[in-house]
Image (cartoon, grey):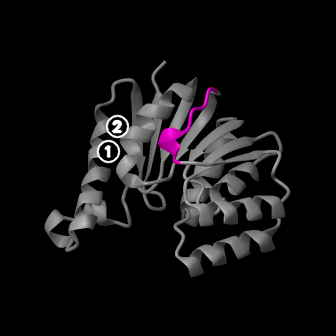
Amino acid sequence: MNENIIRQIKNYADKENVPIMTDDGINYLINYIKENDVKNILEIGTAIGYSAIMMCSVSDDIFVTTIERDEKRYLEALKNIKLLGLENRIRLIYKDALEVVIDEKYDLIFIDAAKAQNIKFFEKFENNLNNNGTIITDNMNFHGLVLKNDKEITSRNLRQLVRKVKNYKTFLEENDKYTTEFLNIGDGVAVSKRKI
C-alpha cells in the first residue's frame, strides 16, 4: 500500500473535515479482518474511501462493496481508489444505503454512516450477513458525547443524535440474535456476532 497516498487521503480528510476512522479504530478493524479470515466486506458509508482502502490492504483476496450518498465524497473516494489501483477490489455504489438492494452475502458488514440511521442499516443489511458473520459499527462513543450527561450537551440537534446512538446501543444489547461486545477503541466500536 502506497504510504504517501494514504497520508494524502488522511490530510485531505483533516483539511476538509471528513470524518474517517481513528488510527486505533482502523488498526483494530485490520487486525479483526486478519484474525477472522474475512474476505468479503460490505461498508455502509464510504466517505472518501479511507477505511475501504485500509481493509483491502490486509490481503489481495479481500473485496469490499461500499456505499456513499454524498456526491463530493463519492467522487473523492473514486479518485483515491483509482490512485491505488483498487478498482477491481472495491465496488463503490453512489446511492443512499437505505435504497440499495444487494443480494450478496458478506463475512463482515461495517457500519460507519449517518449515526441516526444505525438501527435501520443494521436491520436492512443483516440479511446480507454470512451465518458466522460480524457487524461492526464505528462511533459508538460519538466523540465522547455518549458518555456525557444529556444536560452537558448544549445543542438540541446534538442531544438528539447522541440519544439515537444510545438507542442503537440498547438495540444491540437487547438483540437476542447477536452477541455484541462494546470496545473502547478509537471512537468506540460495537462488534456484533450472529449467534449460531
From the image, tell me which residue sits under label 2. Answer: 172
Q: Specify whether residue 33 is painted magenta.
A: no
Q: Which of the 4 image quarters holds residue 178?
A: top left
Q: Is residue 1 visible?
A: no
Residues at marks 2 and 1, CA–CA distance in whole angstroms: 5 Å
**Dot 2 and dot 1 residues touching (CB under 8 Å):** yes
Left or right of 168? Residue 53 is right
Mark 2: secondary structure: helix
Residue at the top extreme? Answer: 196
- Amino acid marked by disc 2: Leu
Rendered position, 89 above or below 25: above
Q: Specify whether residue 100 is painted magenta.
A: yes
Mark 1: secondary structure: helix
Q: Crowding at label 2, few (<14), some or many (≥20) Cα neighbours within 10 Å?
A: many
- Amino acid marked by disc 1: Lys
From the image, tell me which residue sits under label 1. Answer: 169
Residue at the right extreme? Answer: 85
Quadrant location of the N terminus?
A: bottom right
Percent position (x, y) of residue 94?
62, 50
Left or right of 148? Residue 59 is right
- Which residues fall within the magenta stretch? 96-103
Q: Which of the 4 image quarters holds residue 151?
A: bottom left
Residue drawn at point x = 41 percent, y = 32 percent: 123
